[in-house]
Image: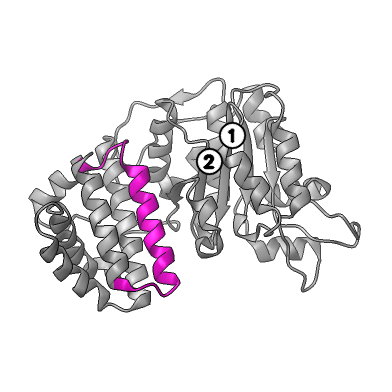
Amino acid sequence: MQFSHFFEQYDLINSLIKIADQGRVSHAQLFYGDESSGAFAICLAYAQYLNCTNKQRFESNTKESLLADSCGECPSCKKYSKLIHPDLHFIFPNTTTKKIDSKNSSILLMNEFRDFILKSDGYVKLDDWYSYLDIGNKQGQINVRDANDIIAALNVKSYESEFKIMIIWAVDKLNYDAAPKLLKILEEPYEKTLFFLITQDRENILPTILSRTQLIKVPNKSSKYKEKELPYLNLFVEWMRNCFQVNSKISEIMKVVEDISKLGREEEKQFLNFTLDVFQKCFIVKMGLTIEANPLENCEQKFRDNFPNFITEKNIEKIYKEIEGAILHVERNGNAKIVFLDLSIKLGFLLINK
């Protein structure tokens, strides 16, 4: 799988390429987006790129072009294209089937899973996977045996490539008993080991797992800046301007918090997701890459030009985690005024101390 297959996602892919080329790849990354986003396929292409031995660089700097791609021809790429590379591992929801009536695990269904992925070109849906297994109304889980298999697979040096890569699809299906084992290895990762976690249901992932991953939002295919999000822009700009005054104007922050808290729980979540998208795209701009749709394009030019300068490699991951934490609190009916005041203060200090 190569990046060139994902024309609509070049903004995101170019940011991944630049981070990889600078040697700043986080050991644990959570890719989230709905099933139409192609998050799984992008993870496959990303893994192939990281271990490609003959990466291709491109000169064009237009927004429609890639910065680089895997070659597709080296031994590593050829094995990735068949999903048989010895340093590429998969864990996914599984259950008993007609052939496996007990002690089910991802490893026992690996041949079926590879066939399913190849036939779908990496654009996977959970219901389609269950239908492929012909399991009726049963639902899959990532169980304790899977967690043990993760540890066993990664507790050895890589066979051929620089990185061992573990792709965990639908990590929101992680069994409660398996979670501590996964958390331990995320906290103490093996050298040159990368985890790509994928979900379309971020709300059902344990906060302890969320806090240990770099969050990467995968937009829908052909997604543009949504018209319904335009009303959030002015509120966001006012909010951020007051956050910069965190040392002196808490009263002004409170006024904006009052306005945000009037949105209602669902709109508060949408506003926070909009905020997350703004920070992500501003970081891409700060890295010198072109984005297809700038969520700040309709705000005052001075803010649009200056705001990305306050988002850096040092604070972006912490900003992601604070916003994600606020989303979880809103989902759990936390007091909106307290949640947004706390978030405002934290964002203010993170931006000031960039």
Residue shown at the point (55%, 58%) measured from the top left:
206
Which stretch is magenta? 310-336
Residue toward you, 141 or 123:
141
Camera sees residue 294: no
Element class at badge 2: strand
Measured as percent of width and height from the top left, residue 251 is found at 11, 65
Disc 1 residue type (three-letter): Pro
Do callouts 2 and 1 mark residues in contact (Cβ within 8 Å)?
A: yes
Mark 2 lies on residue: 28
**Going by the image, does 256 lie left or right of 190?**
left
The amino acid beneath tag 2 is Ala
- What's the magenta bit mostly, secondary-structure-wise? helix
- Residue 223 location in percent, x, y? 38, 59
Residue 189: assigned label: 1
Residue sitting at x 31%, y 61%: 274
Give above or below for 258 relative to 274.
below
Work out whether 345 lies above or below 264: above
Tag nearer the camera, 2 or 1: 1
Image spot of residue 257 (x, y percent): 21, 69
Label 2 packing within 10 angstroms: few (<14), some (14-19), many (20+): many
Q: Residue at x 74, y 64 (%)?
A: 130
Viewed as shown, does residue 119 lie left or right of 257? right
Expressed as whole percent of the image width and height from the top left, the position of residue 64 reads 34, 42
